[in-house]
Image (cartoon, helix red, strand yellow):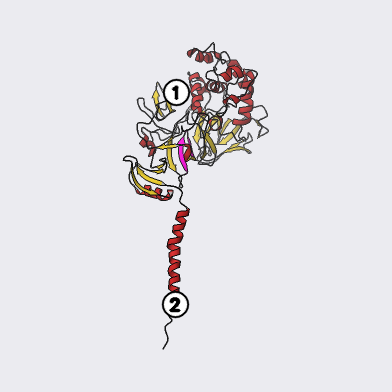
């Protein structure tokens, strides 16, 4: 007859202690050690606090479990960290300070909320430290302390679009609370938009008749709209003249004071030498110099805001003459930099926005590209340049290689998802012959050579 083995009581005690350690003490210790603040789940419509937690992740889970669209997460200071949907206020700093961000594609950028206060709220990171937002075409992340989050309601003044006299007007909010706005006609209104209707958009390509439709992506247009004057490449030709330039300044009664008056010939000489659109340069000069009346334009001959950074605008470059300034802009700033696919500043040679074009790195104003385009649009009132410079703008569904004149060597490549605008010179079998962004010599890019007659090829099958 076998004898039963007796389990020692000490073994039971040890097991119980281990279980308590594993399932109680250690988790509790970990939770205490990982506490990262005090978070409140609150209903903004009633100001009722529904729960409080020491961990953001638990507050976030609680918020997700609620059905109310008014639910938010606040920290101990009352700052809203997360919403189900809402708006982002970027105007939280002095005009000399920019808000830095990292795009969804891991590129760094910056914006100044004093020139465009509102952005679309897209979400908050898992730890409550970063906010995801959209403005001027770019989707990006920034530190939660750089911005303020608000639940959308009609009391806030947001940026909107509308149609007036066949033009697309962008009313840009520069203060969500005071009602400060800046309205500009940026280009011809697309056919799908109606007068007497307010539209919302944070990329200028897709439009929505109210903010809720924007959040739910119930857009008005199936195909994206690209403003011609915002996306025309710099390697095009302007056919306007001195009288048009002067007439524009005459409208504002600044002919006697503006340093840009009677200067058309200068811009067209630079166009002939460097093959850079004269009216695009003139439009940019109007924008940056306040119609040629700014101190930097009058005293420094600086028409383009060169080196006049937000932190220290008095650091602006000084030039011996307007001719020297325009030459430096065309050759050093554009050809060597913003129009050079091998330069870090290059994101396309069009004015663009914060997603593509010169606006990405040239200015902190999110709508700088629209403002420059607005001047070009008004100067080209008869549509002469638009008629003579055929362009095609799309968002790529695949990578796009740009080939040398031999159609073999790849000179530069646009990535899938990029917005690309090209100036079409000739429609050939299987290819588009287009203007190169930089000078081409011996089937290679060479920014130190003359641009004259430079051209490249793209495959039609890739340009979609």
45 or 446: nearer the eye?
45
**Mark 2 or mark 1, which has the lower sequence index?**
2
Mark 2 or mark 1, which is nearer to you? Answer: 2
Q: Is residue 339 visible?
A: no
Q: Which residue is mark 1?
A: 185
The residue that mark 2 highlights is 8
| Quadrant of image for the N terminus | bottom left
Locate residue 3, reporting x and y percent: 42, 85
Q: Nearer the viewer, residue 77 or 174?
A: 77
In this rendered view, identify the residue nearer to me: 296 or 223.
296
Write the residue at 50% across / 23% down.
Answer: 386
Residue 419 percent location from the top left of the image:
51, 35
Residue contact at pointers 2 and 1, CB within 8 angstroms = no
The magenta span reads 129-141
Secondary element type, mark 2: loop
Q: State the count of labels.
A: 2
């Amino acid at each position: 007859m076998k004898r039963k083995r007796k389990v020692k009581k000490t073994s039971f005690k040890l097991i119980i202690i281990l279980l308590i350690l594993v399932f109680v003490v250690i988790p509790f210790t970990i939770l205490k050690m990982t506490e990262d603040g005090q978070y409140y789940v609150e209903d903004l419509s009633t100001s009722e606090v529904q729960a409080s937690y020491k961990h953001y992740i638990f507050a976030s889970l609680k918020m997700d479990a609620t059905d109310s669209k008014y639910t938010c997460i606040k920290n101990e200071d009352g700052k809203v960290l997360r919403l189900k949907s809402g708006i982002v206020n970027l105007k939280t700093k002095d005009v000399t300070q920019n808000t830095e961000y990292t795009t969804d594609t891991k590129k760094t950028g910056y914006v100044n909320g004093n020139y465009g206060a509102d952005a679309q709220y897209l979400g908050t990171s898992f730890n409550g430290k970063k906010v995801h937002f959209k403005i001027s075409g770019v989707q990006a992340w920034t530190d939660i302390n750089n911005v303020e989050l608000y639940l959308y309601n009609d009391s806030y003044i947001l940026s909107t679009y509308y149609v007036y006299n066949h033009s697309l007007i962008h009313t840009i909010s520069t203060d969500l609370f005071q009602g400060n706005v800046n309205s500009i006609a940026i280009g011809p209104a697309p056919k799908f938009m109606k007068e007497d209707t307010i539209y919302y958009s944070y990329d200028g390509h897709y439009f929505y008749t109210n903010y809720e439709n924007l959040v739910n992506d119930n857009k008005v247009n199936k195909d994206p709209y690209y403003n011609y004057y915002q996306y025309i490449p710099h390697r095009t030709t302007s056919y306007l003249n001195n009288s048009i330039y002067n007439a524009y300044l005459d409208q504002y009664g600044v002919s006697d004071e503006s340093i840009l008056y009677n200067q058309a010939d200068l811009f067209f000489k630079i166009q002939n030498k460097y093959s850079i659109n004269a009216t695009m340069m003139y439009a940019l000069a109007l924008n940056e110099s306040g119609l040629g009346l700014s101190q930097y334009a009058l005293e420094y001959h600086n028409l383009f805001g060169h080196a006049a950074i937000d932190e220290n605008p008095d650091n602006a470059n000084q030039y011996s003459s307007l001719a020297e300034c325009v030459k430096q802009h065309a050759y050093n700033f554009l050809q060597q930099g913003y129009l050079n696919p091998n330069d870090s500043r290059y994101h396309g040679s069009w004015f663009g926005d914060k997603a593509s074009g010169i606006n990405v790195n040239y200015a902190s104003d999110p709508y700088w590209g629209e403002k420059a385009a607005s001047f070009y649009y008004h100067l080209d009132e008869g549509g002469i340049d638009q008629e003579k410079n055929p362009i095609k703008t799309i968002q790529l569904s695949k990578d796009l290689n740009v080939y040398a004149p031999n159609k073999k060597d790849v000179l530069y490549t646009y990535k899938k998802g990029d917005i690309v605008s090209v100036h079409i010179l000739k429609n050939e079998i299987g290819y588009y012959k287009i203007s190169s962004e930089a000078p081409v010599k011996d089937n290679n890019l060479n920014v130190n050579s003359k641009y004259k007659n430079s051209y490249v090829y793209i495959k039609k099958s890739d340009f979609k």
